Amino acid sequence: MGTYSTCNGATVYEGAWINDKKHGEGTQTQKGGVVVCGTWQNDKMNGLAHIKKPDCDVYTVIYKDDMRIETNNSGLTTKDKLYVLVALFLAFIFVVATPFGLIT
């Protein structure tokens, strides 16, 4: 167990270390007040992490080698909804136009 702080004090990590690398359970507090609790392997975030933002929102995120894979609130985004709407509209146009020979 140990504590790490960057040279400018922006990030503070408290947790397990192996060979001067974050490895194991730990908590990292970032400059903006975001707190990340999770598991590090070889200095990279892996597995489930709980992220608490200053406005008290808590998210569960899955990481693989410091890359965010999925969040628990990963429902449809506005872009996804727009894509589905456009796809349905184009399908409707195709179905309506085909009997008239407008689309072959």
Image (cartoon, rainbow, N blue to C red):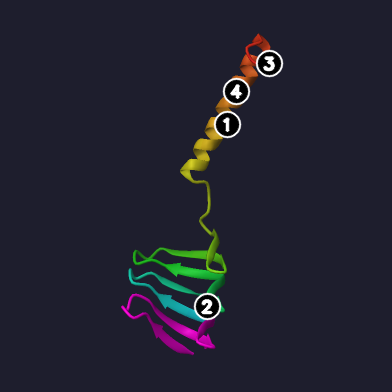
Q: Which residue is mark 3?
A: 104
Q: Amino acid at mark 4?
A: Phe
Residue 40, by quadrant, is bottom right
- Mark 4 / mark 2, whichever is N-terminal: 2
| Point 53% across, 37% down: residue | 83
- Mark 1 / mark 2, whichever is N-terminal: 2
Q: Circle 4 — which element?
A: helix
Distance, label 1 to label 4, CA atoms, is: 9 Å
- Range drawn in magenta: 1-23
Q: Is residue 6 above or below residue 72?
A: below
Q: Circle 3 — which element?
A: loop
| Point 48% across, 41% down: residue | 79
Label 2: few (<14), some or many (≥20) within 10 Å? some
- Mark 3 / mark 2, whichever is N-terminal: 2
Query: Percent position (x, y) of residue 54?
Result: 34, 67
Q: Are discs 1 and 3 less than 8 Å apart at CB?
A: no
Distance, label 4 to label 3, CA atoms, is: 15 Å
Q: Which residue is mark 4?
A: 92
Distance, label 1 to label 2, CA atoms, is: 43 Å
Q: Circle 1 — which element?
A: helix
Q: Amino acid at mark 1?
A: Ala
Residue situated furthest left in the rendering? 8
> From the viewer's perspective, is the residue at label 1 or at label 3 nearer?
3
Query: Percent position (x, y) of residue 71?
Result: 53, 59
